[in-house]
Amino acid sequence: MIGCSILYHLTKLGWTDVVLLERDELTSGSTWHAAAGIHGLHDHNNISRLQYYTMQLYEDLERETGQGCGIFQPGSLYLAQTRDREHQLRMQAAKAKYFQVEFHELGRDEAERLHPLADFDGIRCIMYEPDGGNVDPSGVTHAYAKGARQRGAEIRRFTPVTATVPRADGSWDVETAQGSIRAGVVVNAAGLWAREVAAMAGIELPLMPLEHQYLVTETIPEIEALGRRLPLIADRDGEYYMRQEGLGLLVGAYERDGRYWAEDGTPMDFGHELLDEDLERIEENLLRAFARVPVLEKAGVKRVINGPMIWSPDSSALLGPVPELKNYYCCCGIIPGFSQSGGLGLTLAQWIVDGEPEKDLFPWDLARFGAWANRAFTRARTLDQYAHRFKIHFPYEERGAGRPLNTRPVYEKQKSMGAVFGLSYGYEHPLWYAPKGVEPVETYGFERQNWFEPVAAECRALREAVGIIDVSNFAKYRVHGAGAHDYLERLVANRVPAETGRSCLTPMIGLRGGIAGDFTITRLGDEDYLMIGSGIAERYHRRYFDRVGRRESVSFDSLTEAWAGFNVAGPRARETLAQLTDADLSRSGFGFMRNRRISVAGIDAVALRVSFSGDLGWEIYVPVSRQLELYDALLDAGRAWHARPVGSRALLSLRVEKGYGSWSREYSPEYWPQEVGLDRLIKLDKPEFLGREAYLAIKDRPPREKLVVARVDTDDADANGGEPVFLTDGTPVGRVSSGAYGHSVGASLALCFVRADHAVAGTELDVAILGLPHRAVILEKPPFDAAGERLRA
Ligand SMILES: Cc1cc2nc3c(=O)[nH]c(=O)nc-3n(C[C@H](O)[C@H](O)[C@H](O)COP(=O)(O)OP(=O)(O)OC[C@H]3O[C@@H](n4cnc5c(N)ncnc54)[C@H](O)[C@@H]3O)c2cc1C
């Protein structure tokens, strides 16, 4: 199905010299035996948008092609059995208001009228999505196929791809038993066989198939008597799904005790086959479904489907060009394929044709996983994802499966100091530190959790004296050799420092003129630069780095693994660091945005006078082998000022107080520089840099939205990102990108994208925290040290 959708969307964007090669008959992967339920809302706003696009597309496809898609939209009833689920559903209802789609609360009477066979006892809250339903897997696939053919595409069935061989010019020879095809672009949409097809190009995808079962009952007389279609039941606390199929019911389950399938590789000859049923494994889930809809107890089972589906470590798609290959794209690992097929096809087609998708889809981008997502990790995570498919994933949740994966030398020391860790691009990274006597384990929920007070203490320590933040998870690149300066000038939009000892902040502009990255570039010496960027985007950024030609003399090396770093920050940072170095750290001797190679505690280090916390501070980078030594020395040197380790949750609060944006939250190619305030760093007098022409094309356009800082009136839960934002009359005007309690300013804060005509200081808004309106006001300036005096002290 997904391959056909991509083909269809490519033709829609005007590409007709396209062919889909299918090993067998169309639909012969996971597609043919899917339950094919569809829904619109997702935790991530852009994915919701694309799911709505998909649901709408099926009707258009039917009209366009005459091929039925078997669309049933009797609506879906979402049930909450717990307080947290109620919060989640209320949040979804608020988002629906933002997207201006229907998803609203129903009283029990109304729910019983819609689904007279369900028992709603024990349900705290019921939401109704009128567009929920299901489609026919084969109909949808053939509709995409027909639409694509009508627009000029070709489909060759029974034509398995046996090899993909890259050519020097970036094109590919795609081998089949019927001959070879020279392709400018290759897309791997091989579903259950995505791993095997990827291996043909020499790459490994973090994917693992698991078995999944549902059953279909015989006709149920009560349904037959009803004479209309029942809505779906999404009782996620019960960990099953249920919809009408024919005149019976279909019940599927994600059991805790999941089973891998074909771990070592999907057999090439696996066709329209099913796996042995094992209803015992899903018995508990089924019993919960039977209790909800008691007619199921008497219904005969017509068939049981046990089919494989292939999962990524976070259940999201692996989408986009493979950074290490030329002209090779993937669209694999798709779980809710019927809700997402159109959006995925459109996005990938845009990516191929225009070089970049229109929307920020980092959560779908395959580059979010690096080589660190190895087989053991993938195995552990996919099973965890499967088993917890319907679990509420709370803000800031860190899953334990497959960890610890990689650790740096300070790991044990941090652990001994109470660190609670999260996974940061494959490495254990401290989130916060539990005080003595408190177990270093975090709780999860939509409201403030057990880390609120410890994080407050970390923020206070830094703002009042000094804190030491592990920033080893930042991406670090060294660019050096004759031509390094010229290369960087052509890569980024700001002027690259020409004087040793200077650093600059700079955006990198994407192919549509948006923000593809933000970096600190430091000139260490003649043709020798250190570039610091977002750690989670290292593989993502490689696509852009490789778009700009480099002379052979320029080497571009990642130091992310080889180097470690600490940010020493706070009003006592200078005194702390001075204990360990002879270097002149005075304001005149080591000013803001300056850098120097200095010796810290006898270790050769690169020191940058920058600080993401917004306070006086230095980032100190050393080889990772010296990390522990440096850490001990810094903590020791700051003892007089009670220096303490500060984790990334505190850093979030500190940066939000300063209004600083962060990659994939405030910065993405979707946002224009003038919308996020980075246009001031773009030097158009430079004749050439990546994205310059694209930026020129949008530069004078008025911003669609603007990034603002708002103070939010709340006392039990803070915004954390994704919450919709309304005017006080209920008009949707934006959404939160990052949120946190600002401990130094004593206020709950949110960075929000707000429609430009309303992004005015003093404007009152309602931010939907826990799905309920919380009054907020747009601030004129970031609440902490807007003038930057602390930073420049
Ligand atoms: C039991 C079950 C229930 C499900 N229920 C739902 C649901 O309710 N809602 C929902 O949205 N999703 C559901 N899904 C998931 C859904 O089936 C998938 O998201 C979707 O089918 C993925 O489609 P695909 O095209 O990516 O992969 P696939 O269907 O696996 O297609 C891959 C295609 O690639 C072809 N191929 C492989 N190797 C080669 C090669 N070397 N050369 C040429 N062709 C090749 C295969 O033959 C196949 O046709 C369910 C899945 C299962 C197993």
Image (cartoon, rainbow, N blue to C red):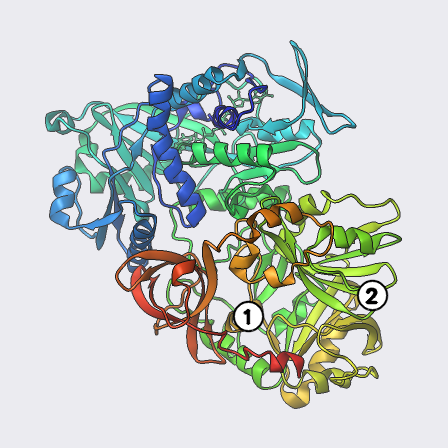
Mark 2 Cα-neighbour bin, 10 Å: few <14, some 14–19, many ≥20: many
Q: Is residue 143 left or right of residue 399?
A: left
Residue type at mark 1: give it. Arg
Residue that carries the numbered disc 1 in the rendered image: 655
- Residue 716 in view (yes/no): yes
Q: Residue furthest bottom?
A: 640
Determine whether 420 is above or below 182 in the image. below
Q: Position of residue 590 (x, y in %)?
A: 77, 79
Q: Position of residue 47 (x, y in %)?
A: 44, 44
Q: Secondary structure at mark 1?
A: helix
Determine whether 285 is above or below 435 in the image. above
Q: Position of residue 177 (x, y in %)?
A: 65, 11
In this view of the protein, which residue sits in the foreground, 150 or 572?
150
Label located before the other in sequence (2 or 1): 2
Determine whether 434 is above or below 406 in the image. below
Q: Is mark 1 within 8 Å of ligand 1?
A: no
Residue type at mark 2: give it. Leu
Determine whether 691 is above or below 263 in the image. below
Viewport quadrant of the C terminus: bottom right
Q: Which residue is pictured at 71% across the width and 65% down the height?
A: 504
Q: Secondary structure at mark 2?
A: strand
Residue that carries the numbered disc 2 in the rendered image: 524
